[in-house]
Image (cartoon, rainbow, N blue to C red):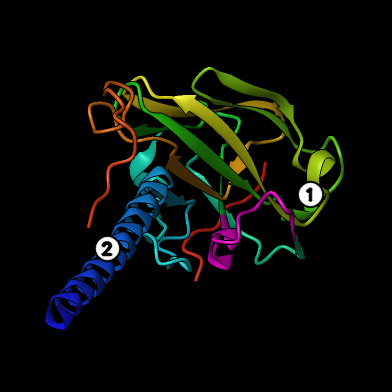
Amino acid sequence: MSEKRTAVRFFAVVFSVLLVTSVASAGMISSVGVAQAQTADDEVLYRANAAGGEVSAVDGGPDWVDDEQYLVAGGTDTSSHGQPSQIDSSVPASTPDGIWNDERWDPSSGDEMQYEFTVPDGQEVEVRLYFYDGYSGTSSVGDRVFDVSVEDQTIENFDIIEKYGDDTGAMESFTVTSDGTIDVDFAHVTENPQINAIEIVSTEPPPGALGGPDSRAFGTVATGHPPTGTGTRT
């Protein structure tokens, strides 16, 4: 009789250990799956540094590369103004100081400045445009005003100094859906448009991928993630 009770207790203990281990393992797998999903949602598609060449990332993500490969019109002149005296809170902590050293600006003659980035049709992205007006000739409100458009969203009469103050690095964000390419366009109003860097981050998986715009959602699935050019202002 005592031997039977001992055997029952032994199997009860083994069952309890296996149950606890299974629950713990499931929790670990679930956590990993969530972490991967969050990382995928924040995937960096492009980081383009205007005119200054490559800048190393400070967050473990992809580096910032020269923007010229994405420039399709205008914007042939560049300038270097060093670092801004302050950074606006709109700028993510993942932004390296190096992107502020150089800017690309668009002269009044010729085509308006335009960039194009290939992004799958139907994919939603956040486009981040980085601005720092370090030119002493445009340090007051109204000195530099231009229009900037990302797909069908436009900021008209954008004045960096008016919105953020002089000698300040800032970021403007646009959330748009791609039609196959993301177009970033600039238009003159007063003086010349300028840009320091462009970053494009996906806000969802690509179309056709699990969880993407063309996929059926089945809930959470556990799974085992020095300046290079100068120019003269006009």
From the viewer's perspective, tell me whether residue 122 is left or right of residue 18: right
Residue at image coords 13%, 75%: 4
In the image, residue 167 above or below residue 203: below
Start and end of the magenta stretch? 87-102
Q: Earlier in the sequence, mark 1 or mark 2?
A: 2
Residue at image coords 26%, 24%: 215
- Magenta region, main secondary structure: loop
Which percent across, then down, holds residue 148? 61, 28
Residue that numbered label 1 is attached to: 137
In the image, residue 85 above or below residue 171: below
Q: Amino acid at mark 1?
A: Gly
Q: Nearer the viewer, residue 23 or 65?
A: 23
Disc 1 and disc 2 in contact, CB within 8 angstroms: no
Q: Is residue 110 visible?
A: no
**88 magenta-colored:** yes
How would you rate the neighbour count of disc 1 (Cα within 10 Å): few for under 14, some for 14-19, many for 20 or more? few
CA gap between label 1 and label 2 equals 71 Å
Q: Amino acid at mark 2?
A: Leu
The numbered disc on residue 19 is: 2
Which percent across, then down, holds residue 65? 38, 56
